[in-house]
Image: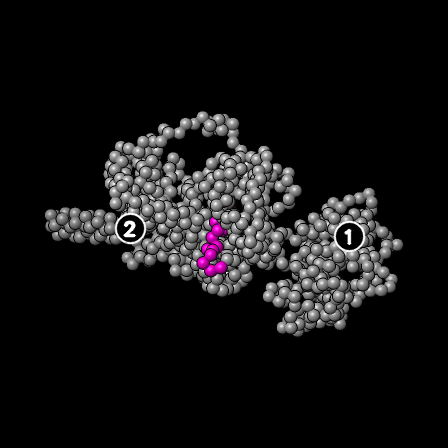
């Protein structure tokens, strides 16, 4: 503990009877002197001496009282030992750093994995360093940040960073472990299922045991041979069912003296051999031929989902299963002579040496990172384990097809890249929206002083029109980063397609035929109709460009319902089982190659020529669909065309709510208002426009450029009818300022304005009874929002 307590410098205080020693001596001396003076006839002097001695004794007794000792630390700091004890409870590596990234406290898991290296220095490459710096920046700005798939000196790991400390001046770094399926549980499911049955049909008894030897699962053949047909496994250990005779052969105890010997193969659950947990495979031994070349063992290997191969003492292949052939990239029925024939030239010596050591020395196991000849760019793990008691087979090779794992790594890297670009796009759009708000607002103020026909009227209208077009670009950036403000409505998908089909005919031109088909009984959806139209237009324009190389073609837009049972039949891991209204856009263009198809939704990725595409079209489509709660899939064949399918969930609305929606009458609110408005905005140009706009519509406006000044104004008990505030501001942000303001004024009406998405901000703000105005906004929109907030009825 960083508590420092300084030693006292004054004398040690007296306590107990020692406090009375000095007063007693003084009193005795005074009495003695008084008696002497009295004997010599000086009575007055004797009385004075006794009185002085008494006073001196009293003062001595008072000064000898024990002083009050001030307890408690003189210097107090954070209790890092307590922090370290708390971090030690986590199994994940955790570190606490200060603002410059220096380590303060780490737990045992962090020390074992990274030593004393600070978090920012564990990156294995420049890309990983940028990811760590991004997470750090997000934590300082938003309070928390995370990135996935960071390559560190100890392997790949996600990273989570949180701002911590009493003054929010520390960072807490966590490197959580990725959740992997329990290999033992996987083995139990396989032996209990079809694989166990197939092993039984191949005359192989199989049982799964844990580290203590207790049987967790077994196939029917093992049950019959180990316990008999009338018994079943329950709290039984494997060692209680088998025995090893004098001939070192294993037999089932229940079969008695006439038991046939069986051979056992133990497949560890973790493939390292360090634990006894795994699968025991038992089969009868034959009297002739090699066990490694028997049909029973080959049937056993073929049902295993992992690539297995057996190698003899000379390092030659004896047999291998189909999973091994697939993982090694072997075609046809040819079998290479040696394991080294499967890898590149640089790895041949390492593989041959490992096989030789495991074949002739003690039975061990280990992993090698090798590069296969057919796929030299992607290293794979080759497990080499020694075998004994299996005839000619002395080495077992395990090779896993990690194509899916590599695909997942690429997806994680892609997700991280999309997150980084999304954060950048959102930040750029937020700043740009402030500029557009000022431009559009000043245009509106100038138009109030001009009428149609004035020389400047058309120029101002043109500036405002171009600003609105620029606002559309920012909405594209926010749609890509899924941070745009949507205005969802309950609508029918065919109605949206019908509205946009007239525009599509002009966009597609005469060489492309547009075919629109609508299904029946489509459920209603809840989405922003304008953004949904943009999705259809972007897909149609891409289809037109793809068909231009073939001189034209047919674009088919179709809507149809998809029921929950149909979704279940699709067997998709991504699409949840529910009712959907689907939209498909199909063209007859050149198609997309498989290598490109997985990248079409990436930002700034385009196959068009320079100057003919930004690469934001399909990424914007993806962002709009995902933010609307839907899913989009792409399917294509080169030379035949491409098909995009969008699934939007059916919106379920209560009857009463639907009835009230139909009977609701809308009327345009008057823009004029009264009362005092406190306007809090850190951008001077936006604050100026908003102040002038509100003043023109009858409000008394008080301005503040930060949250601290706004709270100072509120503390003066000024009459405030409405608080309009930006969300993101330096120092104290808008939500924090509002929470403080509502402590003294709980009924204060709030209108937030921001360039970020309303849905995203509402989830993070978590404040009741607030309204929201998205930037950029016009003078009229600001007046409407203020009037609606002050008088919600």
Give coordinates of residue 339: x percent, y percent. 70, 68
Nearest the viewer among 623 and 463 is 463
The quadrant in which the N terminus is found is bottom left
Q: Vertical placement of 561 versus 46: above or below?
A: above
Q: Is residue 116 visible?
A: no
Q: Vertical placement of 749 versus 67: above or below?
A: above
Residue drawn at 48 percent across, 26 percent down = 659
Give coordinates of residue 421: x percent, y percent. 45, 55
Residue drawn at 34 percent across, 55 percent down = 75
What range is drawn magenta here?
609-627
Mark 2 / mark 1, whichever is N-terminal: 2
Q: Is residue 286 magenta?
A: no
| Residue 356 location, quadrant | bottom right
Q: Element type at marker 1? A: helix
Instruction: Check the image and name the residue furthest to the front.
Output: 510
The alpha-carbon separation of the residues under discs 2 and 1 comes to 87 Å
Mark 1 highlights which residue?
199
Please give the label number shown on residue 269: none
Mark 2 highlights which residue?
67
**Label 2 Cα crowd, 10 Å radius (few <14 / some 14-19 / many 20+):** few
Q: How is the image coloured?
A: one colour
Give coordinates of residue 595: x percent, y percent. 58, 58
Nearest the viewer among 261 and 757 is 757
Q: Vertical placement of 339 versus 588: above or below?
A: below
Left or right: 149 in relation to 233: left
């Amino acid at each position: 503990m960083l508590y420092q307590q300084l030693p006292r410098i004054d004398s040690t205080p007296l306590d107990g009877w020692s406090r009375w020693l000095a007063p007693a001596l003084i009193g005795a001396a005074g009495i003695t002197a008084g008696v002497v003076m009295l004997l010599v006839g000086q009575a007055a002097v004797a009385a004075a001496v006794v009185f002085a001695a008494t006073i001196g004794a009293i003062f001595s007794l008072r000064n000898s009282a024990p002083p009050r000792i001030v307890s408690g630390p003189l210097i107090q700091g954070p209790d890092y030992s307590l922090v370290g004890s708390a971090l030690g409870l986590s199994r994940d590596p955790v570190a606490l750093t200060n603002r410059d990234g220096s380590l303060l406290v780490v737990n045992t898991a962090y020390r074992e994995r990274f030593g004393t290296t600070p978090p920012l220095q564990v990156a294995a490459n420049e890309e990983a360093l940028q990811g760590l710096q991004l997470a750090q920046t997000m934590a300082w700005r938003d309070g928390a940040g995370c990135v996935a798939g960071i390559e560190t000196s100890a392997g790949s790991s996600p990273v989570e960073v949180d701002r911590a400390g009493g003054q929010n001046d520390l960072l807490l770094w966590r490197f959580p472990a990725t959740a992997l399926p329990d290999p033992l549980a996987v083995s139990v499911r396989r032996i209990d299922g079809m694989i166990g049955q197939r092993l039984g049909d191949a005359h192989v008894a199989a049982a799964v045991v844990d580290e203590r030897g207790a049987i967790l699962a077994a196939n029917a053949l093992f049950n019959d041979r180990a316990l008999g047909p009338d018994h079943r496994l329950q709290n039984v250990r494997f060692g209680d069912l088998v025995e090893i005779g004098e001939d070192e052969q294993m037999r089932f105890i229940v079969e008695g003296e006439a038991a046939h010997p069986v051979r056992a193969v133990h497949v560890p659950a973790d493939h390292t051999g360090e634990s006894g947990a795994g699968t025991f495979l038992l089969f009868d031994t034959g009297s002739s031929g090699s066990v490694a070349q028997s049909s029973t063992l080959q049937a056993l290997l073929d049902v295993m989902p992992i690539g297995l191969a057996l190698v003899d003492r000379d390092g030659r292949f004896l047999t291998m299963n189909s999973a091994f052939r697939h993982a090694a990239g072997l075609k046809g029925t040819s079998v290479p002579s040696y394991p080294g024939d499967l890898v590149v030239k640089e790895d041949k010596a390492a593989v041959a040496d490992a096989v030789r050591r495991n074949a002739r020395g003690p039975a061990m196991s280990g992993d090698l990172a090798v590069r296969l000849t057919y796929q030299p760019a992607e290293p794979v793990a080759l497990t080499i384990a020694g075998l004994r008691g299996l005839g000619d087979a002395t080495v077992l090779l395990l090779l896993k097809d990690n194509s899916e794992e590599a695909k997942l790594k690429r997806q994680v890297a892609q997700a991280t890249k999309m997150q980084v670009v999304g954060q950048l796009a959102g930040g750029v759009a937020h700043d740009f929206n402030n500029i557009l708000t000022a431009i559009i607002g000043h245009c509106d103020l100038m138009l109030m002083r001009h009428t149609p026909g004035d020389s400047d009227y058309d120029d101002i209208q043109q500036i405002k029109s171009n600003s609105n077009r620029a606002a559309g670009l920012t909405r594209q950036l926010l749609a890509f980063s899924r941070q745009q403000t949507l205005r969802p409505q309950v609508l029918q998908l065919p109605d949206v397609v019908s509205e946009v089909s007239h525009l599509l005919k002009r966009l597609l031109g005469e060489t492309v035929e547009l075919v629109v088909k609508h299904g029946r009984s489509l459920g209603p959806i809840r989405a922003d109709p304008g953004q949904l139209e943009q999705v259809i237009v972007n897909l149609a324009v891409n289809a037109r460009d793809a068909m231009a190389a073939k001189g034209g073609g047919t674009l088919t837009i179709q809507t149809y319902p998809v029921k929950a049972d149909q979704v279940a039949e699709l067997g998709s891991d991504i699409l949840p089982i529910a009712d959907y209204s689907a939209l498909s856009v199909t063209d007859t263009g050149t198609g997309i190659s498989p290598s490109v198809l997985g990248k079409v939704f990436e930002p700034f990725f385009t196959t068009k020529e320079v100057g003919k595409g930004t690469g934001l079209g399909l990424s914007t489509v993806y962002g709009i669909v995902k933010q609307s709660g839907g899913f989009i899939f792409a399917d294509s064949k080169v030379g035949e065309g491409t098909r995009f399918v969008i699934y939007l969930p059916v919106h379920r609305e209560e009857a009463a709510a639907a009835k009230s929606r139909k009977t609701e009458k809308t009327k345009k609110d008057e823009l004029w208002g009264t009362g005092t408005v406190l306007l809090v905005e850190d951008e001077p140009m936006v604050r100026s426009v908003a102040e002038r706009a509100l003043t023109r519509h009858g409000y008394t406006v008080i301005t503040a450029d930060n949250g601290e000044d706004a709270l100072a104004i509120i503390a003066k008990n000024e009459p405030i009818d409405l608080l309009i505030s930006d969300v993101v501001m330096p120092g104290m942000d808008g939500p924090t300022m509002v929470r403080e303001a509502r402590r003294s004024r709980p009924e204060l009406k709030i209108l937030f304005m921001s360039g970020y998405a309303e849905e995203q901000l509402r989830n993070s703000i978590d404040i009741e009874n607030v309204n929201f105005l998205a930037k950029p906004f016009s003078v009229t929109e600001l007046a409407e929002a203020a009037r609606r907030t002050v008088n919600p009825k």
